[in-house]
Image (tube, rainbow, N blue to C red):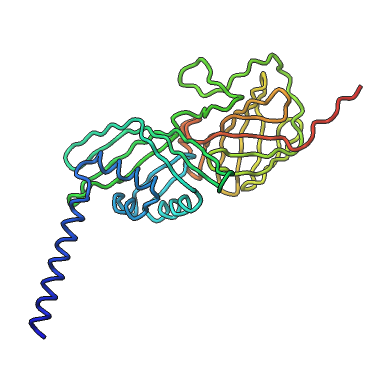
């Protein structure tokens, strides 16, 4: 019995050593490989690999699109689980990646397209998010792990048919070729779609473009209207956030497409204008009143 136990113990130690060696062999040997493995794990919905390649320090702070902030691993893990459940497929082609290394630290810049497929059968919707990322990695016990990262849109313009970039470099303003400058009557009920997150809610506006909407007790305030370019602010007391918007009203005044951004999230107020946000698609639900003779 003792001899058998010894053989079992030796076999266990040898198998453990083999598994450890295989695990070490599968670990990325350089930070670029680690980054590419993380991106592939995201696309393959491989949460265990993401967990292994990301540091779990409780005080690490990272940011993603829309000004969302993650502190530590658990909050990010919950959101990734939800994302994986809500998407049918994810594709993440990397278009540019540059990595710098010094000792046990590395940092990178990356551009990629985050492509989400949502729905079933013929109702599958494909959304492309053009993103840029920066981040820092550290080599710990021979393993490269992502510490902190920051993610934003490469452009607030995602190619909406009513929106086109202005001639001014570095600006995300929307441009209209209409000569009309009068503020139309936009009163009534509007359906608001946040394109990237596929969030839908409704707004009830007066003729000046002011009124509440059904997202965190929100409220829109119109600040200007020039040549169909509709600008304003939004506030959401329900989650303590506020920001701005800029949309281009269609010629028939039944739709508007454009962008939105944060100016404050809780106590965080130093948010670069127009950098964190997404795209809007507004559709008017209230029929346009008939013209009187």
The quadrant in which residue 190 appears is: top right
Residue 214 lies, with reference to residue 224, above or below; the image says below
Looking at the image, which residue is at 40% across and 50% down?
Answer: 45
Quarter occupied by the N terminus:
bottom left
Question: Residue at the location (55% across, 23% down)?
Answer: 173
- In the image, taking residue 265 as reference, residue 236 lies left or right, namely right
Seen as rendered, the residue at the extreme front is 121
User: Across the whole image, how many numbered discs are drawn on residues?
Assistant: 0
Q: Position of residue 117 (x, y in %)?
A: 50, 43
Answer above or below: position of 166 versus 75.
above
Residue 192: image location, x then y, percent:
64, 39
Q: Quadrant of residue 34?
A: top left
Q: Which part of the image, by quadrant, shows the C terminus? A: top right
Q: Identify which residue, 138 or 31, lies in the foreground.
A: 31
- From the viewer's perspective, tell me whether residue 279 is left or right of residue 73: right
Q: Quadrant of residue 204?
A: top right
Q: Which residue is painted at 47% across and 50% down in the image?
A: 83
The residue closer to the viewer here, 289 or 210, is 289
Q: Position of residue 206 (x, y in %)?
A: 75, 35
Query: Against 57, is 9 above or below?
Result: below
Is residue 57 shown to the viewer in this render?
A: no
Q: Residue furthest left?
A: 3
Q: Vertically, is 142 above or below 226?
A: below
Residue farthest along the right direction in this orientation: 293
- Residue 26 position, x and y percent, is 22, 50
Viewer can see residue 195: yes
């Amino acid at each position: 019995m003792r001899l058998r136990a010894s053989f079992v113990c030796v076999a266990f130690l040898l198998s453990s050593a083999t598994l450890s060696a295989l695990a070490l062999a599968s670990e990325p040997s350089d930070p670029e490989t680690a980054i590419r493995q993380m991106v592939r794990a995201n696309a393959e919905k491989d949460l265990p690999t993401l967990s292994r390649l990301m540091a779990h320090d409780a005080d690490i702070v990272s940011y993603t699109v829309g000004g969302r902030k993650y502190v530590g691993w658990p909050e990010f893990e919950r959101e990734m689980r939800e994302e994986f459940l809500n998407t049918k497929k994810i594709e993440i082609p990397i278009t540019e990646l540059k990595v710098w290394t010094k000792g046990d630290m590395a940092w990178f810049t990356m551009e990629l397209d985050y492509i989400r497929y949502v729905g079933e059968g013929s109702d599958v919707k494909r959304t492309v998010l053009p993103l840029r990322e920066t981040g820092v990695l550290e080599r710990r016990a021979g393993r490269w792990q992502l510490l902190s990262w920051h993610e934003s849109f490469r452009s607030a313009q995602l190619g909406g048919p009513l929106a086109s970039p202005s001639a001014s470099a570095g600006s995300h303003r929307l441009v209209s070729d209409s000569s009309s400058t009068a503020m139309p009557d936009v009163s009534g009920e509007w359906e608001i779609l946040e394109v990237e997150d596929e969030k839908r809610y409704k707004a009830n506006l007066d003729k000046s473009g002011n009124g509440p909407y059904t997202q965190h007790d929100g409220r829109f305030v119109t600040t200007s209207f020039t040549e169909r370019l509709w600008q304003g602010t939004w506030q959401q007391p329900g989650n303590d956030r506020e920001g701005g918007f800029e949309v281009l009203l269609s010629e028939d005044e039944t739709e508007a497409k454009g962008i939105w951004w944060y100016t404050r999230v809780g106590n965080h107020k130093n948010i670069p204008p127009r950098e964190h946000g997404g795209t809007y698609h507004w559709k008017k639900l209230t029929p346009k009143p008939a013209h009187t003779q």
